[in-house]
């Protein structure tokens, strides 16, 4: 169980996925605030973000099109490496 913004989030495989996505996004320069919003929105893996779209990400409270596009740009750089 992980607590983010006073909300409990339970992961079937413990905290491993959360730590993996948090570490990768932190290395990409994604702020803690944005990382928390993604996790609260159900994006608990890089794969789940890649499978989504900018329009889906912008449905999360506080994430606009510019921020979502920047996120996808950074993740695409990582995938292309």
Image: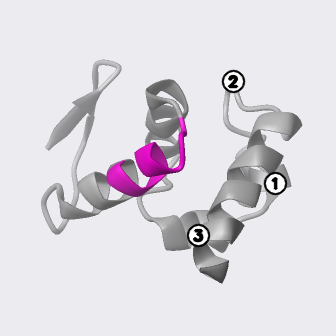
| Span shown in magenta | 23-30
Judged by its main secondary structure, the magenta piece is helix
The residue sitting at 53% across, 43% down in the picture is 38
Dot 3 and dot 2 residues touching (CB under 8 Å): no
The residue sitting at 44% across, 29% down in the picture is 32
Given the current orientation, which residue lies at the most extreme top position? 6
Q: Position of residue 74 (x, y in %)?
A: 67, 56
* Badge 3: residue crowd in 10 Å (few <14, some 14–19, many ≥20): few
Provide the residue designation for mark 3: 78
Observer-nearest of 74 and 19: 74
The residue sitting at 85% across, 52% down in the picture is 55
Secondary structure of the residue carrying numbered label 1: helix
Provide the residue designation for mark 2: 62
Secondary structure of the residue carrying numbered label 3: helix
Where is 53 relative to 56, above or below?
below
* Between discs 3 and 2, the one toward the N terminus: 2
Between marks 3 and 2 in the image, the one whose residue lies nearer the viewer: 3
Q: Position of residue 13 (x, y in %)?
A: 16, 68
- Please identify the quadrant where the N terminus is shown: top left
Total number of numbered discs in the rendering: 3
Secondary structure of the residue carrying numbered label 2: loop
Colour scheme:
one colour
- Please identify the quadrant where the C terminus is shown: bottom right
* Between discs 2 and 1, the one toward the N terminus: 1
Provide the residue designation for mark 1: 54
């Amino acid at each position: 169980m992980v607590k983010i913004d006073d909300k409990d989030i339970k992961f079937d495989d413990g905290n491993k996925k959360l730590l993996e996505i948090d570490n990768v996004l932190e290395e990409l320069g994604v702020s803690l605030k944005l990382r928390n919003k993604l996790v609260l929105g159900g994006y608990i893996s890089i794969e789940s973000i890649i499978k989504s779209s900018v329009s889906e990400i912008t449905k999360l409270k506080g994430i606009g099109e510019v921020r979502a596009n920047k996120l996808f740009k950074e993740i695409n750089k990582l995938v292309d490496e």
